[in-house]
Image: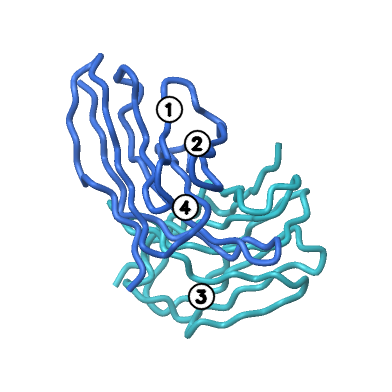
Chain colours: A blue, B cyan
Amino acid sequence: DVKVTQSSRYLVKRTGEKVFLECVQDMDHENMFWYRQDPGLGLRLIYFSYDVKMKEKGDIPEGYSVSREKKERFSLILESASTNQTSMYLCASSQSTGGVEYGYTFGSGTRLTVV
Amino acid sequence: TQLLEQSPQFLSIQEGENLTVYCNSSSVFSSLQWYRQEPGEGPVLLVTVVTGGEVKKLKRLTFQFGDARKDSSLHITAAQPGDTGLYLCAGGGGGGSNYKLTFGKGTLLTVNP
């Protein structure tokens, strides 16, 4: 069964801490994504990567950075956590074929609370 | 900026009823997907449609892609409590980025026993 695995289901961090969210996929997918999901705002794209060591900003990259040193692993870093980064974080991967995106596989999410 | 508008935002129905959820945009997409998300979990892909006018069926769920590839609908027949969840549509290929999806905000469906 193909999988996207996020390292933690729940995290509680203090304001100002550096936070690492890890995501690993076992499908050999080229594309990986980080979203946050908040009530009323839907899914918002933070960063994405279409190849190893490549990254592109999404719609809300401020306060975040990413790392993709290996194809299967995409890490999201909160440089200095703030309370407005309390959210559900979702990682996804995909493999576009012939220029068509056939759909993402999502992880189960990490619910991050910053206190 | 591409937008996908979903309607209704919220839907509460009784078991056995039929329902339709809509996903509309002014942009043309090369593919359109539907996902279902349960509380505390990530979205799960239900279907992908890529051809204008395409209809796909998944048991009691029927998905349609509009002829102009700008809109889609999801119809559920004889809804069951297990259908409860957040339904998200997502379009791919709009604006020249083939792998970056545009998501709607979702329709929260509750099916009461």
Residue A11: x, y in percent?
19, 36
Badge 3, how many Cα within 10 Å: few under 14, some, many 20+? many
Q: Nearer the viewer, residue A108 or A49?
A: A49
Q: Residue furthest bottom?
A: B59
Q: Amino acid at mark 1?
A: Ser
| Residue, disc 2 | A47
Q: Amino acid at mark 2?
A: Tyr
Residue A40: x, y in percent?
46, 38
* Mark 1–mark 4 CB contact (< 8 Å): no
Camera sees residue B12: no
* Mark 3–mark 4 CB contact (< 8 Å): no
- Relative vertical location of residue A110 with respect to residue B61 in this rendering, above or below: above
| Residue, disc 1 | A65
Q: Is residue B43 shown left or right of residue B57?
A: left
Q: CA distance from mark 1 to mark 4?
A: 34 Å
Looking at marks 3 and 4 on the same chain, the residue that comes earlier in the sequence is marked by 4
| Residue, disc 4 | B10
- Relative vertical location of residue A110 with respect to residue A107 in this rendering, above or below: above
Is label 3 in a helix, a strand or a loop? strand
* Mark 1–mark 2 CB contact (< 8 Å): yes
Marking on residue B89: none
Q: Amino acid at mark 4?
A: Phe
Dot in front, 1 or 4? 1
* Mark 4–mark 2 CB contact (< 8 Å): no
Image quarter of residue B57: bottom right
